[in-house]
Image (tube, helix red, strand yellow):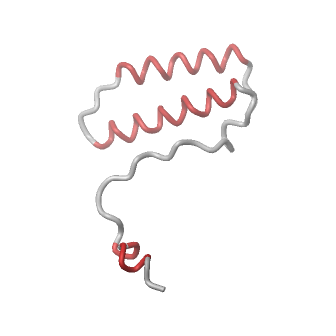
Amino acid sequence: MSLSRRCAETLLDLVEIKLSCLEITDREDMREKELLQRCVQELQAELRGENGATTAFIAPKRRGRRPKHLQFHELHVA
């Protein structure tokens, strides 16, 4: 997607404003925050002249236990 620099900057400002106003009270709010952070990263990539959709991004932190099929002892069996 190709955006003009002015549009990308405006969208970036709007997303950052929404992020600053967001109050996290549950998991749905946390998912929205992560999505907005991804939007910021994509828009910043667009402003740098990269394709925001294909740029590598910081992966969100994983919480909780690993799924049973990925337990530690199973990963290190030779």
Residue 57 versus residue 21 in the image, above or below: below
Q: Residue furthest bottom?
A: 78
Residue at 69% x, 24% y is 47
Q: Residue at x 66, y 31 (%)?
A: 45
Q: Nearer the viewer, residue 3 or 16?
A: 16
Q: Is 73 situated left or right of 47 in this image?
A: left
* Above or below, comparing residue 48 to residue 62 in the picture: above
Spot occupied by residue 12 in the image (x, y as percentages of width and height): 56, 21
Q: Quadrant of the N terminus?
A: top right
Residue at the (51%, 18%) spot, across then down: 14
Q: Which quadrant of the view contains residue 11?
A: top right
- Above or below for 67 versus 60: below
* Image coordinates for residue 66, horizontal then vertical, percent: 35, 65
Seen from the viewer's position, the closer of residues 27 and 68 is 68
Q: Position of residue 72 (x, y in %)?
A: 36, 73
Q: Quadrant of residue 21?
A: top left
Q: How many marks?
A: 0
| Residue at x-position 52% and y-position 42% | 58
Residue 44: quadrant of the picture: top right
70 left or right of 46 in image? left
Residue 10 x/y as whole percent:
60, 15
